[in-house]
Amino acid sequence: MSEAHLLEPLVRRWSRRLPLSADDRSAILALPATKKSFGRDAYMVREGARTTECNLLLRGFAYRQKLLSDGERQIISIHIPTEFVDLQNGLLGTADHSVQSLDRCEVAVIARPVILEVASSYPNLRMAMWIDTLIDGSIFREWVVNVGRRDARARIAHLLCELALRLEQVEAGRHGMFDFPITQEQLADCTGLTAVHTNRTLQSLRKDGLIQLTARTLTVLDWDGLREVGDFDELYLHHQAGTGAR
Amino acid sequence: MSEAHLLEPLVRRWSRRLPLSADDRSAILALPATKKSFGRDAYMVREGARTTECNLLLRGFAYRQKLLSDGERQIISIHIPTEFVDLQNGLLGTADHSVQSLDRCEVAVIARPVILEVASSYPNLRMAMWIDTLIDGSIFREWVVNVGRRDARARIAHLLCELALRLEQVEAGRHGMFDFPITQEQLADCTGLTAVHTNRTLQSLRKDGLIQLTARTLTVLDWDGLREVGDFDELYLHHQAGTGAR
DNA sequence: CGTTAATTTGAGACCATTCAATTTCGGTGG
DNA sequence: CCACCGAAATTGAATGGTCTCAAATTAACG
């Protein structure tokens, strides 16, 4: 596969965000990037390590996590294809958390100097990158609210709403059906719950006819119901971002 | 007070982050900014509102919050003087959360077009701004961990460590003593606890000789002990950020 | 000083955890 | 294609950290 094809998803992603010139598009496709594959739970970035590159997720899911001194972990975000998993490492010299593959992944690796060069030469792409990191931040904020003030049912429902919506945005699902390789233990680490209680909570959501979650597939059966339970408002995803800056 | 003086704290803040040229410094000081004062709990930014400006905190504390449909709230961050409270609003068109003054505040208001103009004309200042928003994001991530996986004692201890350290960084305290106008109810909303339990937890930290917290003053008596209880590692504050990007 | 906000205290209830043990699922080799 | 295996999901029962709901005390402020 040529490098032009490799970064095509990035062109589409950023085009959705703001209008790109022909120049912008070809600049993206001309970026020097390396394709890299990861098995399950492989480290893409290690907390504490010096950072030298950014990873764009092309296939598979990934997650960011922090470990506590007692060995517990908190998952900080889930990433789906077409998203950068560590764009902040273009500017921050040390990784403050780890990034791991959730299932088999493919990523495009872009060196930091390339990121910085693009940012300085292409105003639109710089904006797109900055906005990407800002939306990252907005999602973190919502996660603080989720684990801080919602009960177990709402936490899980909210997380499922968010992931379903983001998957829809990148056309990774249809009719509320999504490939969903996340284990209950991982869902628990996203929501600050135990795996056991996550299991019981999922059963409760299933019993109420809100979702179906089996065999690596999530189906949202009652979108409005799930939103309601999860107290979900998609504003924080800033799907229409980029229009405000003009 | 002249406008040059108004933005002097910003020069100092960003100089700590990366080396600024004389040009950069005078550009900051020449920025059109308006001074504005707020009483207690006044709204500086309202969730859902269109955004047109950014606010730099000059005096007093501020906090960001989200309200849930059941009326509960989660505080997402606390801000101290010299920090922007809503720099992301330079690019994102709609506020996804509210910002309120914690006590009496003074801010410098900078219009969005000014922010964008600075970002496009001054590479160093653009980097400083971007890094500021990235560190914001890093702090949000740590807060997810804090409310997600730590028990009450650790949550409070961690929050106090963070605030004490950030206050020290901007020289707003000495010998572990800080002006600290935050109520227990607000601490509770930062940590996802109730005010009652926050009160008991603070008592426990006091009993162990870790802190003193009375009359709007926080004193860290046993820094190492508090770090230990809070599982605190300051890496995520990226105090040395900006060096990695060169 | 009076009045409201903030802190403190007590006791009972509950949501989520802990700790096993069991069942089901997904992948693998014979 | 079936037997096997480890991982993931599920179940039960007891424990516990935090919440709830008042009520009392203290501090802040005009």
Image (spheres, coloured by chain):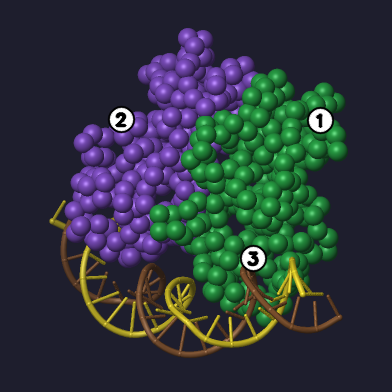
Chain colours: A green, B purple, C yellow, D brown
Please name whichever residue, B145 or A3, is drawn nearer the observer in this view of the structure: A3
Q: CA distance from mark 1 to mark 2?
A: 46 Å
Please name whichever residue, A71 or B233, is drawn nearer the observer in this view of the structure: A71
Residue A241: in sight, yes or no? no
| Residue at the spot 31% in from the left edge and 54% down from the top edge | B229
- Give coordinates of residue B190: x percent, y percent: 42, 53
Amino acid carrying label 1: it is Leu
The subunit letter for the residue under badge 2 reads: B
Is disc 2 on the same chain as disc 1?
Answer: no
Q: Is residue C3 left or right of residue A16?
A: left
- Give coordinates of residue A186: x percent, y percent: 59, 62
Q: Quadrant of the N terminus of chain A?
A: top right
| Residue at the spot 44% in from the left edge and 20% down from the top edge | B15
Q: CA distance from mark 2 to mark 3?
A: 46 Å
| Residue at the spot 28% in from the left edge and 64% down from the top edge | B200
Instruction: Give the quarter of the image for residue B234.
Output: top left
Residue B171: which numbered mark, if any? 2
The subunit letter for the residue under badge 1 reads: A
Residue A183: which numbered mark, if any? 3
Q: Looking at this rendering, what residue extends furthest in the top direction? A: B22
Query: Is residue A61 depicted above or below B10 in this figure?
Result: below
Is disc 3 on the same chain as disc 2?
Answer: no
Amino acid carrying label 3: it is Thr
Amino acid carrying label 2: it is Glu
The subunit letter for the residue under badge 3 reads: A
| Residue at the spot 27% in from the left edge and 40% down from the top edge | B179
Q: Is residue B88 left or right of residue B169?
A: right
